Every structure is written in structure tokens, then in C-alpha cells.
Image (cartoon, rainbow, N blue to C red):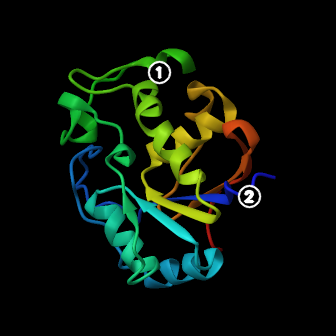
Amino acid sequence: MDSSRATELILIRHAPAITGGRLCGRTDVAADLGDGPAVDALRHMLGEPDHVWCSPALRCRQTLNALWPGKVAREDGALWEQHFGEWEGRAHADIPDIGPLSGQALAAHRPPSGESFVDLCRRAGPAIERAADHPGRVAIVAHAGIVRAALALALGDPAAALVFDVSPLSATRLRPLPGKAFGVISVNWTPQ
């Protein structure tokens, strides 16, 4: 085991976003932290990480502060959610149906003026790897797309990562391995 790499990489999806029924990838909205017992249970379940990274999004910073008040995190713009371009801010009902795309086609699909999931993986992958290069337990508070991007690194396939459910206030745990590889410990882990 490489002692300079993290012993565990914990990716936490932010608390439910207050979106008003709109698609908010890069749209900066607040988190609904009204379920204090769920936040407390997740904090208890995870314990205190050695290092924390965070998306600059308000909903992620609020979730981080609720989980570990006063914990200093490294914000990284590469950890923003997927940019949905012209679909940003639209009601979910107003987003075009892209039909029954294959996994590969869905991962490569780019909304007008936005980025594809493959683009997101290319952007976020190096930041996820940088976080894993810190020793100890490393947490990243970010978005469902970032969690799936980390799973894409572990699986070696962005399309395969799109099948995973990533609930708000869930943790996905990866084990950094030699050669920038990752093992999957658990996905969509919630306190119950």
C-alpha cells in the first residue's frame, strides 16, 4: 500500500438542493438541511476525515459546514456538477427527452452549450486523483455527477458509472490503489 495515498476516499453528495423543480447543475442553489437527524447520523457514520475537499457550490459548502462545523476544506472548481448548458434552470418537464440512448451515447451526449458526462469525467478526474494523493481518510463533498465521475475512474468506463443511484446525503467509499486505480468499498451509503 502506498502510504502517500489516501487510505479511503469518501465522496459525499450534498444535502437535497432547493431547486424549485428546475435542473440545477451549475446553477448555484442552497441546500435543504432541515433534516438534522440525517446530517447527524451521516456525521456519526463517517467520523472525522483527515482532509476535506469541496465543490465551490453553495449547497456543497453548506453540507460540509453542517457535517463538520469549522472544518477547513480545499475548494476546487473542477468539482462543480455537470454543466447542462441551455437546459440549466429549466423545469424538469421542459427538458427535451433524449430518448433511449445506449450507455455510451448517454455518457457522450452534450446538451446545447453544455458538457457531456464524459467531459465532466475529464474535468473532475484529475481533481479526484489529487484528493486521493493525500494520506489518511479524504472526504469530497460534491454532487451526484462528481460521485459518478469517481466511480467512472474506478470502473474505467463513464457509461458504467451512470447506472449508479447517488442519493442526497449519501457517501460512496473508494479505496485508492497503486497506479491511480480505485477499488469500490460501497456506493450510495446512507445511515439507516
Q: Which residue: 62% across, 79% down? A: 47
Q: CA distance from mark 1 to mark 2?
A: 37 Å
**Dot 1 or dot 2, earlier in sequence:** 2
**Badge number at residue 158:** none
Q: Nearer the viewer, mark 1 or mark 2?
A: 2
Label 1 SS: helix
Q: Is residue 163 visible?
A: no
- Measuring from the top left, give residue 52's x and y in whole percent: 48, 66
What kind of element bears circle 2?
Answer: loop
Contact (Cβ within 8 Å) of mark 1 with mark 2:
no
Inspect this view and state whether residue 52 appears.
yes
Q: Between 105 and 179, which is closer to the camera in this rendering?
A: 179
Position of 188 with respect to 167 (left or right) is right
| Residue 171 x, y percent position in the rendering | 58, 61
| Front residue of this view, candidates 5 and 173 | 5
- The residue wearing badge 1 is 106
- Expressed as whole percent of the image width and height from the top left, the position of residue 68 reads 45, 80
163 on left or right of 167: right
| Nearer to us in this view, 191 or 117 | 117
Residue farthest to the right? 1
> In which quadrant is the C terminus drawn?
bottom right
Q: Residue at x 22, y 58 (%)?
A: 29
Q: Establish if 78 lies above or below 167.
A: above
At 46% from the left edge and 44% from the top edge, which residue is drawn? Answer: 127
Residues packed near mark 1 inside 10 Å, few (<14), some (14 to 19) or many (20 plus): some
Q: Dot 2 corresponds to which residue?
A: 3
Residue 28 occupies which quadrant of the picture? Answer: bottom left
Q: Residues within 10 Å of mark 2 (few under 14, many from 20)?
A: few
Q: Amino acid at mark 1?
A: Leu
